[in-house]
Amino acid sequence: MPLDPASAAPLLPTAYPVQDYDPLMKGMVIGGIGILHVFLASFAIGGGFLLWWFEWLGQTGREPLARRFIDSVFRALIFVSFIVGALTGVGMWLTAIQISSPTIGLMVDVFHWVWATEWLFFWLEVVAGYAFFRYGDRLDGRTRLRLLTIYSIAGFGSLFWINGILSWQLTPGEWVETGSVWAGFFNPTFWPSLLFRTVVCFTLAALGGTIVLNLVGGFTREERERLLHRISPFFLPMLAMPFLGAWYLAAMPEDSRDWILGGSMVINMFFNIAVGASALIGGYGVIALWRQRNFMNGATATLLAALAVGATGAGEFIREGVRKPYTVRETLFSTAVTPAQVATLRETGILATDPYPLRDPEAYPTDQLREGRLVYRNLCSICHTVHGAMALNALMGEWSIEQKRLMVAKLQWTGGYMPPFAGSAGELESLVQYIAWEHAKRPKEWRESRDPEVIEEIERMLEEATTLPSPAAQKAAAGEESR
């Protein structure tokens, strides 16, 4: 079922577990692990189809070198998929729980059985893979092909199910109104995302196979050239990338699409990196390898794989970035606060939900600064640090105290990727005082600011900002002014 807007209490955020990754922001930690995991998992999924292709070529007499190639690549595939891939997968779950447990909790709650199904496919992939690795050299041709078929389908099945969950975060579709799991799963970006990721899997399998082919011994240059020509068709799906990308963009919400196409300089820059790197990889793979049958040595393959890492990282950054200010669109803000809870938290304060003390309260000379640090921990630390990446000190340290109050009170007006401030006026003042104190290099003495007139002015600014995200907040404010 979707979240009940009338009931904010069950999902009030907590600060547990309390983590601090300065100078890295929390998003960078989970993002770094996530990019590595996505890259390795995509290679493993595409690698299954590559091995099936070579097994078929070998059994039909089209490629006598196929068996030797499979034995070489499968060892690398087992290492990448079942060891490094599994470790990064566990790392993803660990960091997700540490950094944003309400988000991952909502995803598991909504898609409990879908995720269980995905795990079954992964389990089948592991069993089939280990069986082929252990007994493949003793099996007859038909059994080998069947085992690789199971392995390939299981790997793609894992992608199929996880893609529905991840794309739901950006475009939950009719799930928001109906609560239907299938409406959320087969959401507007499900198919373009699935097909786009499938193309990526095939491309990474081709690059990985080329690298392994150049690293292992026992092949002459002529044999490597022959096998490279057999690998090259796996680059051909990249010809569909521009069309799939355009479909994906068209299926996104308008504001998300606008950020990619220039509304956000950072997201647009990563978009151009992803497009440029993909064009270089696709151009070389399709034209040089498939069309012209050129040779690709290990250095070139590794360079293209590095470009693929860049494209994968940029793509995942875009996927995460265009959801802002949500982690689940229209449902949960990046601060782990639901839209319905903002008005309540403006009254009660965000710290009413946080029973966990600071680790070093003695480091802060006043109660107000300690409160400000707690507000930062609850509402800012998921995307910002104090002095490291996306540092609040660098972003707003030089502003006057009045400007800090105004900009924080109207966060969603400052940038559409920011959620509305979900705390009381007193907590907002504590936060800006804390940032000012940090910018002043933590002096031993600091005067508290609890002037009732200041708090009243902040309350007025919060009321003007409304509890809605952008652009609904601006439209609501404009409607009030026109009355």
Image: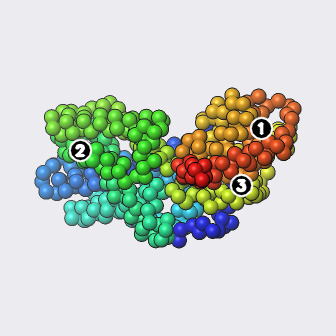
Mark 2 and mark 3 residues within 8 Å of each other at the beta carbon: no
Looking at the picture, tell me which residue is in the foreground, 248 or 59.
Answer: 248
Q: Residue at x 82, y 30 (%)?
A: 443
In the rendered view, does 451 fall on the left or right side of 267?
A: right
Whether residue 146 is visible, yes or no, is yes
| Mark number, residue 433 | 1
Q: Secondary structure at mark 1?
A: helix
- Residue extending furthest left? 61
Q: Residues within 10 Å of mark 2 (few under 14, many from 20)?
A: some
Relative image position of residue 372 (x, y in whole percent): 76, 43
- The residue singled out by tag 2 in the image is 239
Mark 2 and mark 1 residues within 8 Å of each other at the beta carbon: no
In the rendered view, does 198 fall on the left or right side of 433?
A: left
- Please say if 430 is above or below 483: above
Q: Amino acid at mark 3?
A: Arg
| Distance between mark 3 and mark 1 Cα atoms | 18 Å
Whether residue 33 is visible, yes or no, is no
Which mark is first along the chain, 1 or 3? Answer: 3
In the rendered view, does 371 fall on the left or right side of 52?
A: right
Q: Secondary structure at mark 3?
A: helix
Q: Residue at x 32, y 38 (%)?
A: 278
Query: Nearer the observer, disc 3 or disc 1?
Result: 3
| Distance between mark 2 and mark 1 Cα atoms | 54 Å
Q: Residues within 10 Å of mark 3 (few under 14, many from 20)?
A: many
Which mark is first along the chain, 1 or 2? Answer: 2
Q: Amino acid at mark 1?
A: Gln
- Please say if 306 is above or below 455: above
| Mark number, residue 378 | none
In the rendered view, does 316 fall on the left or right side of 284?
A: right
Relative image position of residue 45 (x, y in whole percent): 35, 54
- The residue singled out by tag 3 in the image is 346
